[in-house]
Amino acid sequence: MPISINGSGTITGISVGGLPDGCVQLADLATTGTASSSTFLRGDAAFAEAGGGKVLKHYYNSYDTSTSMGGASSYSMYGGLVATFTPSAASSLLLVTMVQAGQHIITSDPDVSMKYRIKRTIASGTETDIYEIDYVADRATSNARHFHHVPMTILDNPTYNLGESIVYKPFISKYTANYGTTYQAQYGDTRSHVTILELAAN
């Protein structure tokens, strides 16, 4: 096919590989960034230079062993799910998504609210609450049973040294002590799970 240029500047007839080497530069492809042409197109370790936020590492875990607590005037419990993550780079952000599954049974009070938290420990240090969702509520008669799959997501910015492990756990409790309720984590076939994405610092 002959090469032609129409009145609007459109070029037709150029075959694949028909342009000579060196006529397209990185500056023609990217308006910002210092990554080489190969890393800009590939998105490898140098891609952070062209924008940051690259996923450096991922983690997934699930837990399906039933764990129950309740009947007392107040209670709180770990659901059993544990995520232990060691970042691969310094100053990373960690996108943590946990889903706590379980069965909630109302025993006396028709208005019951639950509280869910994510607790974080760095290098076996002090345990810290980093996420909380309140008023996860049910309203029903006594002995009513409800399945909950409660999602919790946080973009965590922990302070750590390279090589240190970070532990995340979901924690469940009554909102107030006078509620009559029991809770069974991972009841029946339900499963709790966690996903962590390590994002490169900008």
Image: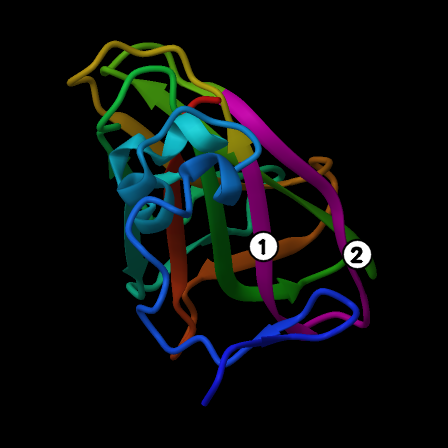
For this view, does 144 lie left or right of residue 50?
A: right
Q: Nearer the viewer, residue 28 or 43?
A: 28
Residue that mark 1 sits on:
151
Q: Residue at x 41, y 49 (%)?
A: 79
Badge 1: residue crowd in 10 Å (few <14, some 14–19, many ≥20): some
Estimate the x, y position of residue 171 in percent, counting from the top left. Answer: 48, 39
Q: Residue 137's image quarter?
A: bottom right
Tag 2 residue = 109
Amino acid at pointer 1: Pro
Dot 2 alpha-carbon crowd within 10 angstroms: few under 14, some 14 to 19, many 20 or more: some
The amino acid type found where label 2 is placed reads: Asp
Query: Does 118 appear in magenta?
Result: no
| Image location of residue 51, percent across then percent down | 50, 31
Residue under the point 38% across and 23% down: 92
- Specify which label sits upstream in the sequence, 1 or 2: 2
Q: Which residues are magenta?
A: 129-154
Q: Secondary structure at mark 1?
A: strand
Q: Is residue 93 visible?
A: no
> Where residue 188 sits: x, y (%)?
40, 77
Marks 1/2: CA–CA distance: 25 Å
